Image (cartoon, rainbow, N blue to C red):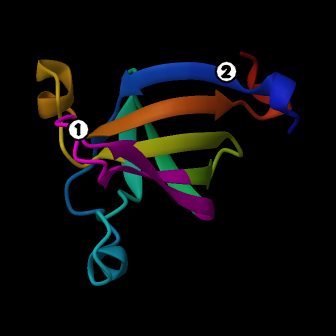
Amino acid sequence: MTEGDTRFVGEPIEPVAGTVDVDRMAVGEPGLPQRFVWRGEQHEVAAVLETGKRYGDCSHGSGERYLRAHTYRIRTKSGDEMKLSFVRRPRSASERRHRWWLQTIARRPDCGS
């Protein structure tokens, strides 16, 4: 899929209980949910295409940098590509309620938009 097909979402997702990838937790990462619900529809992870980390500066001026989020570019069983993020240290009330977020989605061509 091309970058032009990718749409920003920025909405929380709900992991399905009991579907986290515990192997990732063993290396200090959050347990990526293998199934999650977004806008009332359940999605299942078929493949992890890329992982990353997002860092941010210390808010008290010390010059230190902190790990803010883990990111995952995934392909779902339906063929959509999504970028998910896990917020490590929630700052807002919304982030405290929802740690997992759908950042972007690139729908499979025959899925519409």
Mark 2 residue type: Arg
x and y percentages locating residue 68 in the rendered image: 32, 47
Q: Quadrant of residue 5?
A: top right
**Part of the protein shown in magenta:** 47-72
Q: Earlier in the sequence, mark 1 or mark 2?
A: 2
Residue picked out by circle 2: 7
Residue shown at the point (88%, 34%) measured from the top left: 2
Q: Is residue 70 above or below residue 20?
A: above
Front label number (1 vs 2)? 1
Residue shown at the point (68%, 40%) measured from the top left: 80
Q: Residue furthest front?
A: 62
x and y percentages locating residue 103 in the rendered image: 51, 31
Picture disc at residue 104: none
Q: Does the stretch in magenta take in 48?
A: yes
Residue shown at the point (13%, 30%) measured from the top left: 97
Q: Quadrant of the C terminus?
A: top right
Residue picked out by circle 1: 61
3D distance between C-alphas at marks 1 and 2: 34 Å
Q: Quadrant of residue 31?
A: bottom left
